[in-house]
Image (cartoon, rainbow, N blue to C red):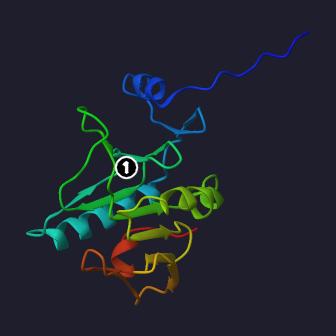
Amino acid sequence: MSAQLKTKLTAEEYLAIERKAERKSEFYDGEMFLMSGATREHNLIVTNIVSELRNQLKGKPCETYPSDMRVRVPATETYTYPDVVVVCGEPQFDDKEFDTLLNPSLIVEVLSRSTASYDKGGKFAHYRTIESLKEYVVVAQDRYEIEHHAKQTDGRWVLTDIGGLDANVELGSIECSLSVREIYDRVALK
């Protein structure tokens, strides 16, 4: 019996398949990874964050996108679907389809059991290579816990742990503040 070699996809092949697919897949190192559905809590947190950011960014040169905006990480040829993306200034896209953003300013990921270690580790390592990215926020969905990573002028990333309903997440790069109470509005922790 002979082992079959797994053929790696190119980014172009991934995009051709992905744009016709009924379900979303992320792409890394020549492989597609099917994304699973989100829980009620996950969806509520994403909706709360998108709503708050959209309201605070009215009149500013920034756009907020929910989880259907694909982001390309050129340095690692990775394609992801962050839970929330904000771009300030003119959005730059990968091609004429305008469905793959290149210059996010802020990315938010809501953790699930299956993605937590990747979102906090490998995925953040990919995101850190995006020059335009200034802040990365990771939100737990099973406890009041948020990690805020802010890029400093010297390129270092500084982590601030935020917990408790009375706290705020200060997003300096987009001049917004998110109340932890609003982020977790109507979310029943388990």
Per the image, the residue denoted by label 1 is 67
Side (left or right) of 100 relative to 122: left
Q: From this view, report whether residue 135 is shown above or below residue 25.
A: below
Outermost residue, top side: 1
Q: From this view, report whether residue 13 is shown above or below residue 164.
A: above
The quadrant of the picture occupied by the N terminus is: top right
Side (left or right) of 178 relative to 21: left
Q: Position of residue 122 (x, y in %)?
A: 62, 57
The kind of residue on which mark 1 rests is Ser
Outermost residue, left side: 59
Viewer-proximal residue among 21 and 74? 74
Q: Position of residue 132 (x, y in %)?
A: 35, 63
Outermost residue, front side: 154
Viewer-proximal residue among 64 and 30? 30
Q: From this view, report whether residue 86 is shown above or below residue 160.
A: above
Circle 1 Cα neighbour tier, 10 Å, few/some/many (<14 / 14–19 / ≥20): some
Q: Position of residue 28 (x, y in %)?
A: 57, 40
Tell me the residue at 18%/56% (across/down): 90
Tell me the residue at 52%/27% (across/down): 10
Outermost residue, right side: 1
Tell me the residue at 22%/52% (across/down): 91
**Quadrant in which residue 59 is drawn:** bottom left
The quadrant of the picture occupied by the C terminus is: bottom right
Q: Position of residue 134 (x, y in %)?
A: 38, 70
Tell me the residue at 48%/28% (across/down): 14
Query: Secondary structure beneath disc 1?
Result: loop
| Number of numbered tags placed on the structure image | 1
